[in-house]
Amino acid sequence: MKRRNFLAMTGAAGAALWLPRAFAAQADAHSDFSASGIAPPFARGYGNLLILVELKGGNDGLNTVIPYTDPLYQSLRPTIGIKREQMIQLDERTALHPSLAPLMPLWQAKQLAIVEGVSYPQPNLSHFRSIEIWDTASRSDQYLREGWLTRAFAERPVPGSFAADGVVIGSAEMGPLANGARAIALVNPAQFVRESKLAVPVSLHERNPELAHILDVENDIVKAADRLRPAKAVPLKTSFSGDAFGTSIKAAMQVLAAGGAPKSDDVAVIRLTLNGFDTHQNQPGRQAALLKQFADGMVALRSALTELGRWNDALVMTYAEFGRRPRENQSAGTDHGTVAPHFMLGGRVKGGLYGVPPVLARLDGNGNLPVGVDFRQMYATALGPWWGLDSASILQGRFEPLPVLRA
C-alpha cells in the first residue's frame, strides 16, 4: 500500500501519526543495552539534540542574506531587491532581510551562525530530485535509498531508553529519516497541541486486509506515541505564533517536555517544515511573511528550549533543496537556482558569518552562483563534533565540519 493512502485512512480515523516501520524489532535490539547495564554507544552524543528546519520550496538567499555593497545586486533585482534603508546591516558587506529583525538578539549573543554559498557540485534544479539529494546526502549522480540520519542511526543506534530516533512534525515525508529510522511523523501538530495526543488505535482489519501487517504493530506504535506525549499539555511561558509553523514548534516542545528530566523518553532529532518558498511570482510579500514566521519561530524555539533546559544541548539547522537565481524574473519572483545561505543556531554555536559570500560578477553560464560550501559539511558538523560519529562513513566521503560549535 502506498504511504499516502495509509496516511489518508489514519487521518480520517483521527490518528496523527505515521510510523514507517515496526518499533518492536528495534526495541528488542536496543533492549540488550539496558538489560546488560552497558551504556549504549555514543549515548552522551545523542543527548545533544538536532533540530532540522526545512525551508521547503527553496528560499531566495540573496534577499535573505544580502550582499548590499555589490553593485550588481540592485541591477539584477530592480523590482524585488530590498531597499538599502530597510536592510538590517550585519557588517560592512552583509545585511539581513527586514523580516529577520527578531533574530538580531541571537546574532548579538553570537548564537546564530550564517553559512553562505551552500549547495553541492553539479546541482539539480528539480524540486523532487534535489531534495532527495539533500535527504540522502548523495552525489548529484548517485541514488541512495536511506536518509542520511537513517544511516547514522544504523551505524550507532540511538539508546533504547529513547522513545524514538526522531520526530517529524508538520509533514508526512520522512526526509533524512526515511527507510529505516525509528521515526514518527506527527502530521497534525494542531491536534497534538489541542489534545495532547499523537495517535489513537484504528481498527481497519475488516475494511482493508491489506493493512494487516501495519495493524499488527499498532500497539507498538501507540506505546511509542504515549511515551512522547504528556498526560496533559505542559505549561510553558513561551508564546508561540498561531500559524502552522508556530504550532509545529509548540508541538515539538511538548514532545521534548514529555521526557522530563532526566531525559528518559528523549529523541535525537526533530524535523520541522516551513512551506511556501517556491517564489516564482510576487516574491516580496510572500517571502517577507515566510521569513517573519521563521524568525518568530526561532525566537520561540530558543525561549522554550531555554525553559526546558535544552538550549545549550540543541543545534538548530536549516536546509532546503536549492536557492533561487540572482536575476529576478518577469513575474516579480525568482526561479530555481543553486546556492543559498543557511542558519545554524544554539547555545553552543559560535555565531558569525561562515562560508563563501556571493560575488554577483562571477555567475556561471546559466546565471547562477558557484557552489561555495558543500551541504554535507553542515551534516558532517552535526555528525562529528555534535554527536561524535564517523561522518566520513555515513556520508560516504570526507567533508570538513564547519567551525561553528563551541566545545
Image: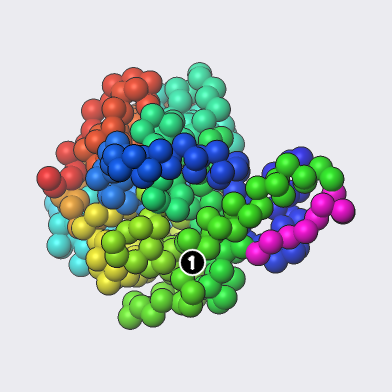
Give the image quarter of residue 236: bottom left
**Relative to residue 267, is residue 39 depicted above or below?**
above
Q: At 28% across and 54% down in the image, what residue appears?
A: 314
Residue 207 within the segment the image draws in magenta: yes
Q: Magenta region's main secondary structure?
A: loop
Quadrant occupied by the C terminus: top left
Q: Nearer the viewer, residue 46 or 346?
A: 46
What coloring was used for the rendering? Answer: rainbow
Q: At 47% across and 61% down in the image, what residue appears?
A: 228
Q: Nearer the viewer, residue 236 or 81?
A: 236
**Relative to residue 117, is residue 13 depicted above or below?**
below
Q: Nearer the viewer, residue 98 or 153?
A: 153
Looking at the image, residue 169 sits to the left or right of residue 19; the answer is left
Q: At 25% across and 61% down in the image, what residue appears?
A: 311
Residue 170 within the segment the image draws in magenta: no
Looking at the rendering, the stretch of residues picked out in magenta corresponds to: 200-208
Mark 1 lies on residue:
229
Q: Report if residue 160 is visible in the image.
A: yes
Looking at the image, residue 269 sits to the left or right of residue 175; the answer is left
**Relative to residue 251, is residue 79 depicted above or below?**
above
Q: At 15% across and 57% down in the image, what residue appears?
A: 110
- Residue 388, image x and y in percent? 24, 36
- Residue 155, image x and y in percent? 38, 29
- Residue 297, image x and y in percent? 38, 66
